[in-house]
Image: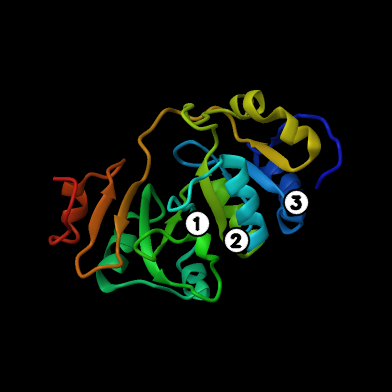
Amino acid sequence: MGSLTDARPVPFWSPAEIDAAIPRVIAHVTNGGLLAYPTETVYGFGGAIDTDAVTALVGLKNRPLGKPFLLLVSSSAMIGRLGLHMTHSASMLAARFWPGPLTLVLRGAEKRVPARLRGPEGGVAVRWTSHPALQRLIASLGDPLTSTSANKPRQPAALAASEVLLQFAPLVQSGSLMVLDGGRLEPSAPSTVVDCTGAHLRVIRPGALSAEVLRSVVPDLVGDQ
């Protein structure tokens, strides 16, 4: 990290490209570097869950206080290792809709997750990504990746690696940001965010999964009509 390099993305599409990229990506992340990567919705920015990497991500996004990032995981076991608490209702939603575009805000993980990743309700937002290449990367890393949309404030979220490079080429050239090119993504709704920290689960951001669909599993879900 930090050395001048070409502002070119790392191929991250075919199985061979993914195999070749993962060791390089893990070295970059464990050295404090940030990533731009494809997800099942849009391209995201992220990195390790330690305080220094989260602080770097805050700077990259110019993120205001009180607006945290979410965590992407590759298994339910990873949630357990973090010390996050899944209520019965949250577990029912996860069993039905994970991996997929559902983000759950969970309590716990006080020893593993920096305070900057917590929302105003004190929870940590988590999604088990359904993007196959990203699942492999996170599983190989052995820890979650932080995640936020790959764009500058008030700009559309990137749907291709070229759009990230257009806005952030100097950071790629400096070596602080590595861009993974997983091809152009189809426009899609963001993940639905459900707060699982209270007595009743509550939709706090509508998205790809409607409240009606979620209530087929958890009938007392509140919010989003």
Q: Which residue type carries mark 1?
A: Leu
The foreground one among 200 and 73 is 200
Which residue has dot 1 on it? 71
> Count of labels shown?
3
Which residue has dot 3 on it? 28
The residue depicted at 16 percent of the width and 56 percent of the height is 222
What is the distance, in whole Å, between disc 2 and disc 3 at their CAs? Answer: 14 Å
The foreground one among 192 and 65 is 65
First in sequence: mark 2 or mark 1? 2
Secondary structure of the residue carrying tag 1 is: strand
First in sequence: mark 3 or mark 1? 3
Residue 61 image point, x, y percent: 56, 41
Secondary structure of the residue carrying tag 2 is: loop
User: Which image quadrant: the C terminus?
Assistant: top left
Q: Is residue 76 above or below residue 181?
A: below
Q: Which image quadrant for residue 111?
A: bottom right
Q: Which residue type carries mark 3?
A: His
The residue depicted at 55 percent of the width and 65 percent of the height is 114
The foreground one among 31 and 140 is 31
Q: Which residue type carries mark 2?
A: Ile
What is the distance, in whole Å, between disc 2 and disc 1 at their CAs? Answer: 8 Å
Secondary structure of the residue carrying tag 3 is: helix
Q: Are marks 2 and 1 in contact (CB under 8 Å)?
A: yes
Q: Residue 99: give its label.
A: none
Residue count near mark 3 (Cα–Cα under 10 Å), binned few <14, some 14–19, many ≥20: many
Which residue has dot 2 on it? 49
Q: Is residue 216 above or below residue 91?
A: above
